[in-house]
Image (cartoon, grey):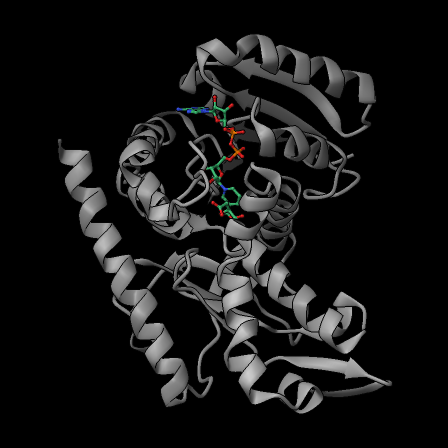
Amino acid sequence: MAEPVRVCITGAAGQIGYSLVYMVGSGAVFGPDTPVILHLLDIAPMMSVLNGVCMEISDCALPCVRDLIPTDNPEVAFKDIDAAFLVGAMPRKEGMERKDLLAANVKIFKVQGEALDKFAKKSVKVLVVGNPANTNALICAKYAPSIPRENFSAMTRLDQNRAQAQIAQRLGIPVTDVKNIIIWGNHSSTQFPDVRHASATVNGQKVSVYDAIKDDSYLKGDFITTVQKRGGAVIAARRLSSAMSAAKAACDHMKSIWQGTSEGQYVSMGVFSDGSYNTPEGVMFSFPVTIKDKKWSIVMGLPIDDFAQGKLDATAKELCEERDDAIAACQN
Ligand code: NAD
Ligand code: LMR
């Protein structure tokens, strides 16, 4: 067995936490031969619920789970951790946009950035799930200046998974036969799910998704809006925001960081923009990335047509506005 990985999950008593703690404990992220020590953070009033989650995890008798540390103290939660899933934050209700959560949630990520800076390993990989995820990740990194900012990322993997599933269903093929769909920009209704560079395997032949679907108006219309609005559709149906699929996507994202991407494939995640693809430098923009040795690199050189450029500009503008609002909120 390998050395144990110390993993923090915040909001561990919440909806996403309920699925995520199990998935991480099952070995799905760090590997079936890697023990995990789970640091589970929630707020004081949720400690009884969190203790119940710990009882259940213990009762699952998961071979990978070496220890469970439930706590409401960020110092204990972040002490010497290798990986963090920052989930703990308020979810939106029907009729809200994710950016409406900024005022309520951004200060959580300021405080947790400061605590990560003090207590976590400098090599810690931090995935921000709590909404608005891109901007919360930006703030978290800003308040953790001793941790390399490349170690912070925001989750758009759920959008990628949604897009992949929509295309697979449309073509009647397994999801694994759809590759390289990109989510550009913000995890919000301005995101741009882009299939221009994606491929599908149909009847044993690898073809572009555009050639396989042969319906430009769908790919530039309903497909994009379905993915952009899927979170809201789940909330309208469940009266709760997505949880099982969010936990699965968080595991996929961290697994990609930990284990790297496969040859010829990329994944999407919100990372600090270096200005690539004419995006504003310094915002947490979702790009296609490849990952090796736990380091991501933006996939360069993909052609961007006028349609795509318009979409990238719109989501970039929103991210700049969110960044400015978040910085102002943290100063109050
Ligand atoms: P939830 O309300 O069920 O759970 C949130 C948990 O966080 C609660 O137990 C709460 O007590 C805890 N919490 C609040 N403040 C905390 C703090 N300072 N420290 C630690 N824990 C704290 O919500 P949920 O459905 O699990 O969603 C959590 C967040 O994830 C929401 O912001 C939601 O919008 C977001 N989300 C993001 C994505 C994505 O794709 N990026 C997908 C789904 C949900
Ligand atoms: C999602 O995409 O399902 C989450 O971000 C929750 C939400 O508010 O839509």
**104 or 221, which lies in front?**
221
**217 or 194, which lies in front?**
217
Q: Is residue 167 left or right of residue 14?
A: right
Quadrant of the snapshot with the N terminus = top right
Quadrant of the snapshot with the C terminus = top left
**239 or 191, which lies in front?**
239
Q: Position of residue 30 (x, y in %)?
A: 68, 42
Say whether residue 300 is visible. yes
Of all residues, the one furthest to the right in this rendering is 203
Q: Position of residue 68 (x, y in %)?
A: 65, 18
Where is residue 69, by image quadrant? top right
Residue at 27% in and 40% down: 145
Residue at 19% in and 35% down: 330
Q: Position of residue 34 (x, y in %)?
A: 73, 36
Q: Position of residue 239 (x, y in %)?
A: 56, 37
Q: Is residue 92 above or below residue 180?
A: above
Residue at 56% in and 26% down: 14
Q: Is residue 106 left or right of residue 243?
A: left
Q: Is residue 62 above or below residue 147?
A: above
Say whether residue 148 is visible. no
Residue at 55% in and 30% down: 9
Tell how many labels. 0
Q: Is residue 59 above or below residue 92?
A: above
